[in-house]
Amino acid sequence: MDPSLLTPLFTLLGTLVGGLVTFAVNRQQFRHQLQALQQQYKTEFMAEETARHFLSHKSFTDRSFDVLKKHLGGFEDDELRKILVRAGAVRTYREDDSEWWYLLSRMGERIEKLQQRA
């Protein structure tokens, strides 16, 4: 092989290897930072996950705020509302002024159920 091609080829190879090593190290650091934040805010992460679980139940698209509050105890009302919003939930009120929540991702399913009742 021509020696004038070897220098650029090895330079390119070294750059690629260095880039891959940097990418792997940064990715590992990102994972570690994410795990540290999840551990630090574990209560909030688990509360969002639990809220999604209750709002994802196949039989019920809507849940009353009182039921969610009962199962997600330990939070003030407004704090729980923020958790529900972070979980992807939307608030609605019924005719009796009771507060109900449903997942935005299940809006189509919710509309179908409301149309079946009407």
Image (spheres, rainbow, N blue to C red):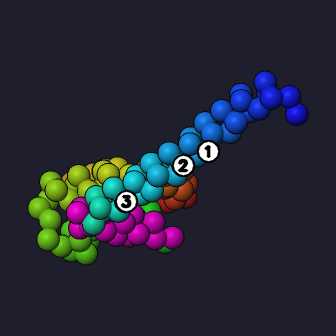
Label 2 belongs to which residue?
A: 21
The answer to whether mark 1 and mark 2 are in CB contact below 8 A is: yes
Q: Amino acid at mark 1?
A: Val
Query: Is the Cβ of the residue at disc 3 closer than 8 Å to that at disc 1?
Result: no
Q: Is residue 118 visible?
A: no
Q: Nearer the viewer, residue 110 or 80?
A: 80
Q: Position of residue 13 (x, y in %)?
A: 68, 39
Q: In the rendered structure, which segment of residues is drawn in magenta?
A: 40-58
Residue 73 magenta-drawn?
Answer: no
Compared to residue 54, the image places residue 16 above or below, namely: above
> Which-is-in-front pick, marks 3 and 2?
2
* Secondary structure mostly seen in the magenta stretch: helix
* Location of mark 1 (residue): 17
Residue 43 among magenta residues = yes
Dot label at residue 32: 3
Indicate the position of residue 98 as horizontal and vertical percent values: 23, 58
Q: Amino acid at mark 2?
A: Val
Dot 3 alpha-carbon crowd within 10 angstroms: few under 14, some 14 to 19, many 20 or more: few
Label 1: which secondary element: helix
Q: Position of residue 52 (x, y in %)?
A: 39, 64
Whole-angstrom CA distance, mark 1 to mark 2, is: 6 Å
Question: CA gap, disc 3 to disc 2?
Answer: 17 Å
Mark 1 Cα shell of 10 Å, populated few (<14), some (14-19), many (≥20): few
Residue located at (11% from left, 61% from top): 76
- The quadrant where residue 67 appears: bottom left
